[in-house]
Every structure is written in C-alpha cells, then in structure tokens.
Image (cartoon, coloured by chain):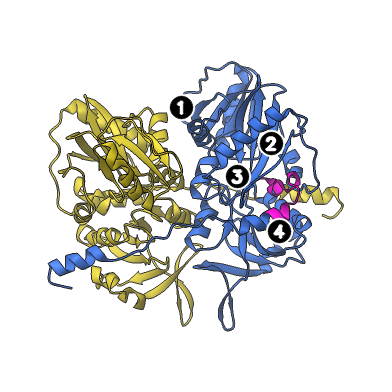
Chain colours: A blue, B yellow
Amino acid sequence: MKLAIVFGGSSYEHEISIVSAITMKKVLKKSELIYIFVSSDRKFYLIDTEKINAKLFSSGDYKKAKQLTLKSGGFFMDGMFGSKAVDFDVALNLIHGRDGEDGKIASLMEFYGIPFISPRLEASALSYNKLYTKFLAESLGVKTVAYEYLSKNDERKISMDFPVIIKPVRLGSSIGVSIVRDASELDYALDVAFEFDSDVIVEPFIEGVKEYNQAGTYTDGWELSIVEEPQKEVFLDFEKKYMDFSRDSKVLAADITDAMKAKIQESFKKIYDPLFKGSIIRCDFFVVNGEVLLNEINPIPGSMANYLFEDFEAMLQRLSSNLPKEQDIAVNYDYIHSIQSAKGKA
Amino acid sequence: MKLAIVFGGSSYEHEISIVSAITMKKVLKKSELIYIFVSSDRKFYLIDTEKINAKLFSSGDYKKAKQLTLKSGGFFMDGMFGSKAVDFDVALNLIHGRDGEDGKIASLMEFYGIPFISPRLEASALSYNKLYTKFLAESLGVKTVAYEYLSKNDERKISMDFPVIIKPVRLGSSIGVSIVRDASELDYALDVAFEFDSDVIVEPFIEGVKEYNQAGTYTDGWELSIVEEPQKEVFLDFEKKYMDFSRDSKVLAADITDAMKAKIQESFKKIYDPLFKGSIIRCDFFVVNGEVLLNEINPIPGSMANYLFEDFEAMLQRLSSNLPKEQDIAVNYDYIHSIQSAKGKA
C-alpha cells in the first residue's frame, strides 16, 4: 500500500501532527509512506520519507522540499516536462485540530477526487465543535455530560455548581481548558478560553471520574480496539498529551466487566455509523453511576490510536479498500436546453 | 468592486447555478464581474464576462476557456511567463446544492485565504442538512416543523398522520421531494427520495400553510430584506423554482402585521448571528396558529434573493468590507525545541 500522510496544517496542534506523522514510520513498516506536509501558511511540500524528523520543520528546512499543487486527481509536482501527480493509493489525514479536524482537508480531498482516510465533511464539522457533538450524540441516543454554553459576548454567568471545567468549543488537546473550583476563578478561565475560541462549553468537573477510550473503524465489518483506561493527571495538559501523540507501543485493556465493555462499544457504534465511515476515530467516555457518557470524539486521534489495535497496519489496508464513495451526480443541461427550445434558440 | 462569481459545481443544481450567475450580470451593473465556472468534474474555468450565456455551458464550449488552478492566495492562470493570479477583491459563492452549500467551496476559499461571500464551513454543514438544521434551530430557540427521520436501511414506518412531505435531508430545490397523501404512496415516495440521499426527513404536509421568506445579512449592521409571501403551487416543483433563480425584478412586501414581521425578523437574526456571518441567506418560515416555524435555510438562495433588497449591489459592497476573519493561529515549534533540548539535539 502506498500511503500519503498529510500532516501539519494551520492549527494549534501543528507540532503534534508532526509528531504523529513521524510516529507512523515506526508503526507502518510494510507500507510505502509518502509524506505531504501542510505548512502553517498552507502550502504543500513533499517531504523525503528517509529524512523526515522533527527538526526539519522547526528549523524551517522543509521549505527546501518540493512544493506541490492540489488539483483534480492528486497532488502535482511541476517539473521540466510539465506537471506530474505524486503516486499513492490513499491519503491519510493526520492533521490534528484546525484544517484536519474541522472538515477543510476532507473537503479538499473530496472536491479533488482523492481517496482518503478521514472523517468526511459533515462528520468533521459536527465533531470539531463540542456543542454540535452534544446535539449529535443526543439525536443518536448517546448520553453526554451535562453542559452550559457561553458565547464571548454573553453575560458571564453559569448556573451549575462548582467545580466546573471550561472548554473552548472548537479545540482539541486541552488547549484553553481550565478547571474552575469556585466563582472567583471563573473570569480568568473564561478569558483564557476566549483567547482561543468565540464559544465555550462549561461542564461539571467530576473528580476522579472513570474514563475509558474506545477507538475503532468500519472496514468490511466492525473493527474495534481494546478499551483503554487512560492514565491521567487531574486532566491531561498539553505537554503530557503531546507525548501521547508519539505512542507506538501496545497498552493493556481496561479491567472492566463484559457488560460495561458492551455498553461502551454500543455507544461507539451509534456515534460512528454511518457518519464517520472512512475514518478511524477514538471516542472518550466517562462512566458515572454505571452510565456511559460520551465525553468527546477524537476525529483524528494522536498517532491514530494505533497502539490500541492488534494489527493497525492491516486494518488501515482493509479500510483503504472500503472507503465510502461520494454519490455520483450526473449533471445535464435539460432545463437550459428546454428553455432555449422554447425561446427558439436551441 | 471586482467580484468573482464562482458558479456551477458537481451538484444537481449545477444548471440553476448557471442561471443565477447570469442573472447577476443584470443585477450588478456597477461592479466589475469575473466569472469562474466550476465544471461538473470540478475544474475551474475563467469565463469571458462579455460572452457568458447558458448555451456556452450546455454545449460544452466552456472547455475552450482558460483553466485556472486554485492555490494559496487565489485562482491562478498559467501563461508564457509563469503563473498569474486572477485579479478580484472578493469571491461570491453562487454554487447551489452540493459543493457550494455543503461547505466545500467555503473550505477551499478559507484554506487558500481568498476573501469570500458565503456561509462558512460550519454554517454550511449545518444548513445543508435538514436534520442538522433542526438541531441548530432548536438550540437557538427557533421552532421548526415537527419531523421524523429515516435512513435508507431503517424500517419504513412513520408515526405521524398523512398527508406528509418527504424530503431528502441534503438537497435543495425540491429535488426528490414528494407529498404523500396516504400509506399506499409512502414506499414509492421513499424510493424516489432515497435515489438522491441516504437519509430523509418526514414532516406533516400542511395544506395552504402561510409561508414567508426573509433574506438578510450583517454588514456594518443588520440588513434585512422585505418579507415576501412566495406565490406557490402545491409546492414549488423544480421547473418553477428554476425560473425563480433568474429573478431580478422587485417584488411586493407581504401583507402582514408589524408584530408578525418582528417575529419573523427575530427568528432570522437568531439563526444568522453569528454562525452565518459573511453570507446572504434566505430563511423560509411557516406561520401556523400565529407561531413562526423555520421551514428551511437557503444558504445560497437563487440569484442571491437580490429582488428582495432595496439596493442589492450596495449591500454586497458593504458585506465585502465586513467579512469575518479567520482566527490567526501562530504556529511555533516550542515543544519540538524543548524535546530536542532535553535529548541534547537542539
């Protein structure tokens, strides 16, 4: 399999996308990897797979790499004898945060007819926004944590009891997230969150809540990962999460009952099918009083949550052969023709 | 104002987008118009403004026009002396249906940093899908018509009373829409709708319901159109709607009370602000027992609903000067640097 890894992007998580991308080299040993870097000013560069390392990007040396142009059917390289498409079977969208998770890369791939692994446009738009994720989950019968919603210009008043957790609606990786233990801390936490986003959600902060992660995809059938109980600090800060994006070694399955596992997996499937077809996602659940609540959807999880799967590479290959197809629309000009006939112009 | 009109697209409404685009020439007399056609196979062509007419497209003659490539900062034309950007101030997304209304064009424009008039990605994804429109309206306190939701593989059973109206969730312009008067007609109507989409919504069909259209935008302040009571057949079929897309003459305001007008405008503002900033949309409302219900959002209305505004061209100009800006994200490599320091590699 020739796999093009698309990474970087104009995102607060630009750096960790680079880490995720480099991790793929350790994980995908049988595939031919093609690295396509999206710079922060949204230019495409073809990065030499042999030479890829973090410093290439932090030093700016990537700018010496060959620039690519996205056109119908692929990424093209200009050369002496015209334009030539970069050869690969499927693209893997590995841009965390904006561009990758908000639906832009999915839009570009779909518009230009490039086979790709990623949540599609609608799935991206809904899961990138924590408020819309709530709407989605509720409509599918999956419970979520209680919440309140605040916009930048709203009165800064919440009605739930402290402690609460404040999250910008559109970011991942704990950026701009704060725990607020009493009313005196609220203003500062909102200032921080509104630095990053125009909207926030407020949820009760549940000390020591049981958290379980379930990753999965649908290829020629369901492929669900082990359920992981993430080791965590009070909550994962950016640096800790960053390290998480380079994970490539297996973890142990959480010690939970079969009944609980079944509940978690049922919730995962409700969220995934059919909206997320074509992608590998990780859903993070809380369990409160025996009830499974969706905490968040990670539409492009760190290092694709490879460490949760038995044989990640084989699964990726099966997914590549089972990607959803865009509906064919046959454009015709029947009405224009009929109007022209009526006008005697046809 | 140099305005690039982007039209066509891989959409069931490809043809009516052409009609809308040509209509703009009659409406926008003071602006310099640049026509960028998106063919059904999603290539970009620069169409001569002097020569534009419907037959150019139905005959396939557009293929002789100059092809363009979308790159960072604009649409580029290859020439003898390298690549040159097409010169314009702002692009107007006038693609109806898929590509234009689903968020793809918005994604492309935002990704490549082109100033554009259109609903942005999130607004598009939510309004293109009639089910998500319901979620959105409910969350904003705007009432909608009761509905049931059916996916292709669901049991074909509905619990509301006949007559009902069946609508594919993702299409505009009445395509695939049927009125079902009793249970015997249900199967056929669903077959028709599922031809076009994997999901449908079912709503009660209310004979003779009062319908009112409100268009508007936010420039340096609110700019709301007159409220129109559309003249209609049982419901607008495709051909009738098609004619509607070429409208350029003013219509009369609906004969409603000030109180009703205020209710309609309040609902419009709730939907529009802030999600739809940067766009001109039309919301279609039903009034049932004095209550205003959102029927649908037209994110790219036919001929931009120009005929509902006093001075459409001046408004477009004000909107061009008041487009929402994408949030700046300063990408840095702090974590990569700090890890490299820790490893002694920096």
Residue A323 x %, y %: 56, 56
Mark 4 and mark 1 on one chain: yes
Evaluate whether label 2 is on the same chain as label 1: yes
User: For the residue labelled by badge 1, is the local secondary structure a helix, a strand or a loop?
Assistant: loop
> Which quadrant would residue A287 be assigned to in this image?
top right
Q: Kindly indicate whether the residue at mark 1 contacts the one at mark 3 (C-beta within 8 angstroms).
A: no
The majority secondary structure of the magenta stretch comes to helix
Q: In the rendered image, which residue does mark 4 sit on?
A: A57
Q: CA distance from mark 3 to mark 1?
A: 29 Å
Mark 2 → mark 4, Cα distance in angstroms: 31 Å
Residue A302 lies in magenta, yes or no? Answer: yes
* Numbered range of the magenta stretch: A299-315
Residue indicated by mark 2: A213
On the image, numbered disc 3 is attached to which residue? A299
Q: Quadrant of residue A204?
A: top right
Residue type at mark 2: give it.
Answer: Asn
